[in-house]
Amino acid sequence: MKFYSTNNKTLRTDFKDAVFNSLPSDKGLYMPEYIPKLDPMFIKNIAQYSLPDIAFEIAYAFLKDDIPSADLKKIVNEAINFEAPVKFLDRETGVLELFHGPSFAFKDFGARFMSRVMGYFSQEEDQLLDVLVATSGDTGGAVALGFLGVAGTRVTILYPKGKVSKVQEQQLTTNGQNIRAIEIDGTFDDCQALVKQAFNDSELNKELRLTSANSINIARLIPQTFYYFWAYAQLRIQGIHEVVFTVPSGNYGNIGAGLLAYKMGLPVSGFVAATNANDTVPRFLDSGNYEPRPSVQTLANAMDVGNPSNWVRIQDLFDQDLNALRALIKTYTYDDEATKKGMQEMYDKFHYIACPHTAIAYLAAKENRADHPGEYASILLSTAHACKFPDAIPAEIFDQVELPKGAEAFDAKQKQAADLNVDHDSFKAYLLDNR
Ligand SMILES: *Cc1c(COP(=O)(O)O)cnc(C)c1O
């Protein structure tokens, strides 16, 4: 299968180049040249299959021409090696827990698959692949742990000093092996600017084989469709056929994958995009005018995105048909006060401790059900484990958080991070001196 750019549909790139470029040179986003439909018999019998089985079926539909099936199976089995259970709060509301991977957030699906695909394509290369990532917290952890131990690759993570949570910092800085971290005396935007400057530096590009582990990489989008089919399989076991997915959204990669799954034939009655105060998409679906704004800081900070980069993909998937999007996607927006109440309510009513992003999804699923009553299951996507957000969760609730398996292991490990100012020359010298 080839991939085109959303800015130029006549351009055709093969999967390998789409993965290493991340972005087409015209600054569009890569999209598959056609959407493969899954075999209706497979969907009918989906309750018989495991998560890795389903993941392989989907990956194969996209990549059968690019990666031999035995290799693809190995990539899938290594990448998707953790659970994603649906836990029911009540008979009509389930939480799809996507945080049982090594970084305790759903980004593990994308990052682990992408890292193994990059490792696979790098086998033929003599030179190490240098992955540069700027992170405000969650992406970096998933990328670091995703690439950990993947042969032929090395990851350099830049994060803003003092601006990530303890668990996040541990995930970034205690890995060793092929992962290294640099704390930057600045903001996330400064980290991003340093990475961008490095990519634009011709000398660095001559000396090193650089790539980004960008969240818009096509190899991160495809694996995020896996868990929509897997959730559906779990519902079918319960005898449930109708489902609406509620997705806490920032950059719209997660819900974008859900919409892709829908186009592949997943039976879905609808989607709910749940947002914090960064409500560019809800305003767009309301007014028809796309008016991005600078992001504002909220408790659900992994969704603090003012101009969601995956939105053009969704528009492309629906041929810019605003009415089709409006029919399929409902949107709800919550401020920090409401988010806190959502976390409190989930705890009081169901004894469920949710991260702020998940709480926003809970509120939106509930409001959507009130607006559109019916015989369907609301599945809310739980994007991260609560332990990653100590400052955003009411203290009495946070005290009850049980650390997931693997979290204590980080405590025993030593933080290792270089310390740099916001300065291209120092970053460049660091990269060249530490090859
Ligand atoms: C990244 C992230 C989101 C937002 O997902 P998008 O794909 O950017 O919409 C929500 N919650 C958590 C915990 C995240 O890490």
Image (tube, helix red, strand yellow):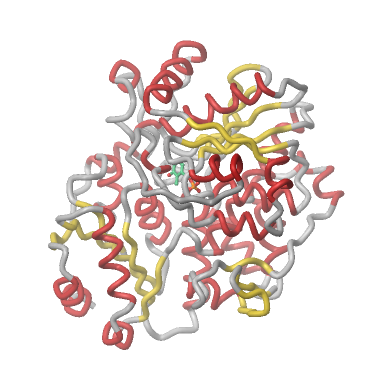
Q: Quadrant of residue 298?
A: top left
Residue 245 on image: x %, y %: 64, 36
State the residue lying farthest toward the right. Answer: 41
| Viewer-side residue, 397 vs 13 | 13
> For this view, does 185 lie left or right of residue 81?
left
Q: Residue at x 60, y 51 (%)?
A: 256
Q: Quadrant of residue 129?
A: bottom left
Q: Residue at x 59, y 43 (%)?
A: 287
* Above-or-below relation of 81 to 347: below
Q: How many marks?
A: 0
Q: Residue at x 40, y 68 (%)?
A: 212
> For this view, does 396 lie left or right of residue 262?
left
* Above-or-below relation of 130 to 249: below
> For this view, does 370 lie left or right of residue 268?
left
* Above-or-below relation of 145 to 404: below
State the residue lying farthest toward the top. Answer: 348
- The quadrant of the image that shows the C terminus is bottom left
- The quadrant of the image that shows the N terminus is bottom right
Residue 336 on image: x %, y %: 37, 27
Residue 283 on image: x %, y %: 54, 41
* Above-or-below relation of 86 to 288: above
Q: Residue at x 36, y 40 (%)?
A: 301
